[in-house]
Image: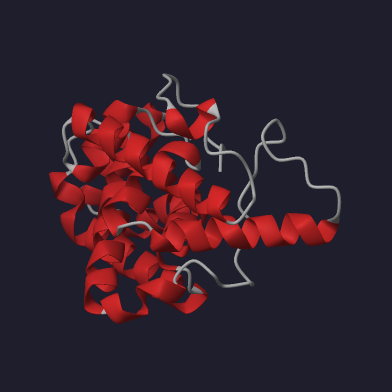
């Protein structure tokens, strides 16, 4: 669905064709759920967060002006829901993002070259644990950048932060994740993927 098609669909929903909101939900439900799952680590919590995010989107649809992509607006709503849930359940944060039933994080072949399935599984678990140890706001920025492929400006729109703050959080999050992985012998923390900032929004680096 193109951006213009989404705008037209939203206008029709606001004009009274409320049943068309389901089309927007179906177009974005996987991405919203995926973001919630990586933020929260629990399938049930992710489902609850996704439902709450779409409920908020429904209530606030009239406030969407189209200045950003609809998906970016949804990411902001979803991130806020997840951060609220994490704050309410801060004592459980240590175990977040470790659900074995969750979709495996994509790992860059150029930095990780496991020789066996066991090593791959251990590495994915280490990355999930490393993400879980990050502060929620750092985790949020890193997931939006390296998994969902948003640009710095889009992340700024999704989080309400300045682009410079976004870059700083992502840089520090990568350093912390790299240090955690290096402490477990998974890779050298001196590599460029996590210790230097680069432009672009290709995503999928985790």
* 63 vs 122, nearest the viewer: 122
* 149 vs 167, nearest the viewer: 167
Q: Where does the image place residue 86, in percent across and percent down from the top left?
A: 29, 70
Let me know if residue 26 appears in the view.
yes
Residue at the farthest right position: 116
Residue at the farthest top position: 199
For this view, does 192 lie left or right of residue 67? Answer: right
Residue drawn at the location 57% of the way across and 38% of the way down:
204
Residue drawn at the location 45% of the way across and 75% of the way down:
95
Up/down of 66 relative to 58, above or below? above
Scheme of colours in the image: secondary structure
Up/down of 160 relative to 197, above or below? below
Residue drawn at the location 21% of the way across and 27% of the way down:
164
Let me know if residue 12 appears in the view.
no
Q: Where does the image place residue 203, in percent across and percent down from the top left?
A: 52, 34
* 9 vs 29, nearest the viewer: 29
Tell how many labels: 0
* 18 vs 96, nearest the viewer: 96
Up/down of 116 relative to 188, above or below? below
Q: Where does the image place residue 16, in percent across and percent down from the top left?
A: 23, 54
Which quarter of the figure is the C terminus placed in?
top right
For this view, does 205 lie left or right of residue 177? Answer: right
The image quarter in which residue 135 lies: bottom left
Residue drawn at the location 56% of the way across and 72% of the way down:
99
For this view, does 113 lie left or right of residue 86? Answer: right
Q: Where does the image place residue 145, in percent across and percent down from the top left?
A: 42, 37
């Amino acid at each position: 669905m193109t951006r213009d098609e989404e705008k037209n669909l939203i206008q029709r929903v606001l004009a009274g064709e409320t049943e068309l909101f389901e089309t927007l939900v179906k177009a974005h439900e996987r991405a919203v759920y995926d973001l919630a799952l990586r933020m929260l680590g629990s399938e049930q919590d992710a489902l609850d967060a996704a439902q709450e995010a779409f409920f908020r989107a429904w209530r606030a649809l009239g406030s969407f002006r189209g200045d950003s992509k609809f998906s970016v607006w949804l990411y902001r709503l979803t991130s806020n829901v997840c951060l609220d849930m994490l704050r309410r359940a801060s004592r459980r944060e240590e175990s977040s993002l470790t659900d074995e039933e969750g979709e495996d994080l994509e790992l860059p072949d150029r930095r990780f070259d496991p020789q066996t399935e066991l090593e791959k599984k251990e590495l994915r678990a280490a990355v999930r644990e490393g993400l879980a140890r990050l502060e929620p706001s750092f985790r949020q920025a890193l997931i939006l950048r390296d998994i969902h492929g948003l640009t710095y400006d889009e992340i700024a729109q999704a989080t309400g932060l300045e682009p410079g703050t976004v870059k700083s959080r992502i840089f520090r999050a990568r350093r912390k994740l790299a240090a955690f992985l290096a402490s477990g012998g998974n890779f050298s923390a001196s590599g460029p993927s996590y210790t230097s900032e680069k432009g672009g929004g290709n995503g999928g680096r985790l």
